[in-house]
């Protein structure tokens, strides 16, 4: 499939342009030289614009359009206490005149910091619930029933906007990246990114397969060791995208490369390797990564370089998915 054809299919979907696109594609020459590895590039999706940016803004463009088209006046979504998705959804809702309820997993902290501080400033109705991720949907459905009884029209957004409607944002991102690479006469060999709830990877893999590129997409799973459930979820989301866009190419498990060796003790637990990666990128390229997602993904990329996973002349694009407000939450662990 040609890029123009795929773009036309995306353009038929409801969309409200919120993010500042295209985001820059920048070379990282000092980091490349220091590591003695492949040519490193970075796709700056931390610069999407609204409320400290991040990958969720690409997804929100399609999610918000769908919600408004369905007559919603209040959004309900979920995430961890320091959820980037919650922060971006709150900002987008306010920009479009919608109310928002955040059903966050965990205890209310004594101090509001990072993303949680921003959620509060944005005026979100924040509700803390002791639950695991599997209990989030029933919790949101309960809130939706309450709001319906009050005369509202709620719209539930799954955590991370990781469902086909939101993940189309990363089909669009791949098109953008391919266009930038062509303009720069750059042959991309690998794309490396943090994979959490699966939507970003599903969008990238879907576009990759539809366009028949020879790029290998490496998802660094940041919650625990890579597991079969996430692979299956990515395939499910990707094939939902195929139905939305009427794509003939179905994604299968062989298309999903998921690496879980760099998550440490689990989601939100900063590893020493991630802390070092954050400092290294900051001090060589002046770019700030985050402690939960991109720091771990970069630590994984650095280790793969040291293991000789890439050829010296490979071009590797690291997708910076944002999350920098969390740096302030982890300040005591980062300043050592």
Image (cartoon, helix red, strand yellow):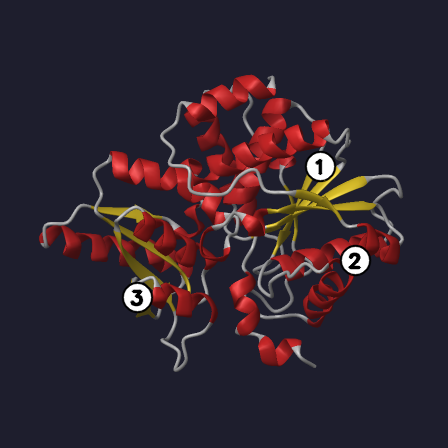
The image shows residue 332 at horizontal and vertical percentages of 60, 81
Q: Earlier in the sequence, mark 1 or mark 3?
A: 3
Q: Which mark is residue 303?
A: 2
Q: Secondary structure at mark 1?
A: strand
Identified at 27% across, 38% down, the residue is 68
Question: Residue 264 in the image: x percent, y percent?
Answer: 65, 67
Which of discs 3 and 2 lies nearer the camera? The answer is 3
Q: Circle 3: is it few (<14), some (14-19), or many (20+) Cα within 10 Å?
A: some
Identify the image quadrant of residue 106.
Answer: bottom left
Q: Nearer the viewer, residue 259 or 171?
A: 171
Q: Nearer the viewer, residue 85 or 21?
A: 21
Viewer-nearest of discs 1 and 3: 3
Q: Say which element carries label 3.
A: strand
Pointer 1 local density, CA inside 10 Å: few below 14, some 14–19, many at least 20 = some
- The residue indicated by pointer 1 is 216
The mark found on residue 126 in the picture is 3
**Residue 254: image location, x then y, percent:** 64, 35
Vertical side of 277 occupied by 236: above or below: above
SS type, badge 2: helix
Whichever of callouts 2 and 1 sits on the residue coming sooner in the sequence is 1
Left or right? Give the position of 255 relative to 102: right
Label 3 vs label 2: CA separation?
38 Å
**Residue 273: image location, x then y, percent:** 72, 67
| Residue 98 versus residue 175 in the image, above or below | below
| Residue that appears at 34% across and 59% down | 135
User: CB of mark 2 within 8 Å of CB of mark 1?
Assistant: no
C-alpha span from label 2 to label 1:
17 Å
Q: Which mark is residue 152?
A: none
């Amino acid at each position: 499939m040609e890029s123009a054809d795929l773009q036309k299919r995306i353009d038929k979907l409801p969309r409200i342009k919120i993010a500042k696109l295209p985001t820059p594609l920048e070379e990282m020459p000092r980091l490349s030289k220091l590591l003695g590895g492949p040519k490193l590039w970075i796709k700056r999706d931390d610069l999407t614009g609204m409320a400290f940016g991040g990958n969720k803004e690409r997804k929100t463009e399609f999610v918000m359009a769908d919600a408004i088209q369905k007559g919603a006046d209040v959004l309900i979504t979920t995430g961890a206490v320091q959820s980037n998705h919650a922060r971006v959804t709150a900002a987008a809702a306010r920009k479009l005149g919608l109310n928002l309820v955040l059903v966050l997993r965990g205890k209310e902290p004594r101090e509001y910091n990072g993303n949680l501080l921003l959620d509060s400033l944005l005026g979100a109705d924040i509700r803390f619930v002791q639950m695991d991720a599997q209990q989030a949907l029933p919790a949101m459905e309960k809130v939706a029933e309450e709001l319906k009884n009050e005369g509202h029209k709620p719209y539930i957004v799954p955590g991370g906007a990781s469902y086909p409607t939101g993940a189309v944002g990363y089909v669009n991102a791949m098109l953008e990246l391919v266009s930038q690479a062509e303009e720069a006469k750059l042959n991309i060999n690998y794309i490396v990114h943090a994979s959490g709830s699966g939507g970003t990877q599903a969008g990238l893999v879907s576009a990759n397969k539809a366009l028949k590129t020879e790029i290998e997409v490496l998802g660094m799973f940041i919650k625990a060791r890579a597991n079969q459930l996430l692979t299956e979820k990515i395939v499910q989301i990707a094939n939902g995208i195929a139905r939305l866009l009427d794509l003939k190419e179905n994604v299968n498990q062989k298309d999903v490369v998921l690496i879980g060796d760099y998550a440490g003790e689990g989601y939100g637990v900063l590893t020493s390797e991630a802390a070092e990666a954050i400092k290294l990128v900051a001090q060589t390229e002046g770019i700030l990564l985050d402690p939960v997602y991109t720091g771990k993904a970069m630590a994984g990329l650095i280790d793969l370089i040291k293991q000789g996973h890439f050829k010296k002349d490979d071009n590797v694009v690291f997708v910076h998915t944002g999350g920098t407000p969390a740096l302030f939450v982890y300040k005591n662990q980062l300043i050592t």
